Image (cartoon, helix red, strand yellow):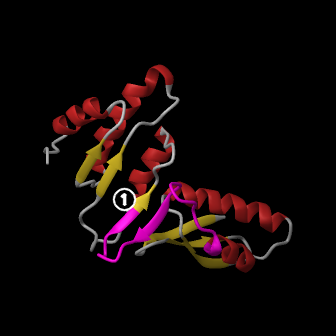
Amino acid sequence: MSAHAIRASDTCLVFEVKTPWDKAVVKSSFYGTHQILNALAAIAVAESFQVSLADCVSVIEKTVADPGRGRVVKLPSGTLLLDDAYNANPVSAHALLSWFTHVPAQYSNKILVFGTMKELGEQALAEHLRFIRACSAAGVTELYLYGEFGEAMRAEALKAGYTEQ
């Protein structure tokens, strides 16, 4: 089983799923290429119980992220808002950046509001700074930083070429 032709539309991630028996186009409201792996795993399990690919795709397309858990919203202004504010962690934060690489070109201004990732122990500061360094490579154009490591992240952002606003 595999995923191909991965692209983003205004509010969903679109990809083609190929199984040994069938293929289908999926429009998932979840962002990030890691969500494609989750969809493929769900399809594999469902197909082992003789659930059709069409039924799997239908369920995936009807599933919507909870607020704060990777929900993509198109605002009346035409801006895309990605709400991933609920207790992010390093894996989900970097997955957010992978989603930015698939955003359609007409959304050239990629704004990120980022706060504290909790429960990281001794690696907390290092993980926050590593994430900030990765933002520029992902095409994030503006950063708004707050929380426990806000000042340290701001300093790291300045080193990475961001300007204060």
Residue 102 in view (yes/no): no
Instruction: Please tell me whether the stretch drawn in magenta is mainly helix, strand or loop.
Output: loop
Residue 63 among magenta residues: yes
* Residue at 53% from the left image edge and 29% from the top image edge: 119
Tell me which residue sits at (51%, 48%) in the image.
Answer: 86
Can you identify the residue that label 1 sits on?
Answer: 100
Residue 123 location, quadrant: top left
Q: Position of residue 118 (x, y in %)?
A: 49, 33
Depth order, front residue of 85/98: 85
Q: Is residue 48 left or right of residue 12?
A: right
Asked if residue 136 lies left or right of residue 123, the reply is left
- Give the image location of residue 66, x and y in percent: 58, 60
Look at the image and tell me in which quarter the N terminus lies.
bottom right
Asked if residue 54 can be seen in this view, the reply is yes
Q: Is residue 64 left or right of residue 153?
A: right
For mark 1, does the 10 Å Cα neighbourhood hold few (<14), some (14 to 19), or many (20 or more) residues?
many
Instruction: Look at 57% across and 66% down and name the residue there.
Output: 3
Front in this rendered view, residue 110 or 149: 149
As drawn, the residue found furthest toward the right would be 49
Under mark 1, the amino acid is Phe
Q: Residue furthest top?
A: 122
Q: Which residue is depicted at the point 50% across and 55% down? A: 68
Magenta range: 61-81
Q: Is residue 17 magenta?
A: no
82 lies above or below 87: below
In the depicted view, which residue is nearer to us: 26 or 96? 96
Image x and y of residue 99, in percent: 42, 59
**54 over 144 or under it: above or below:** below
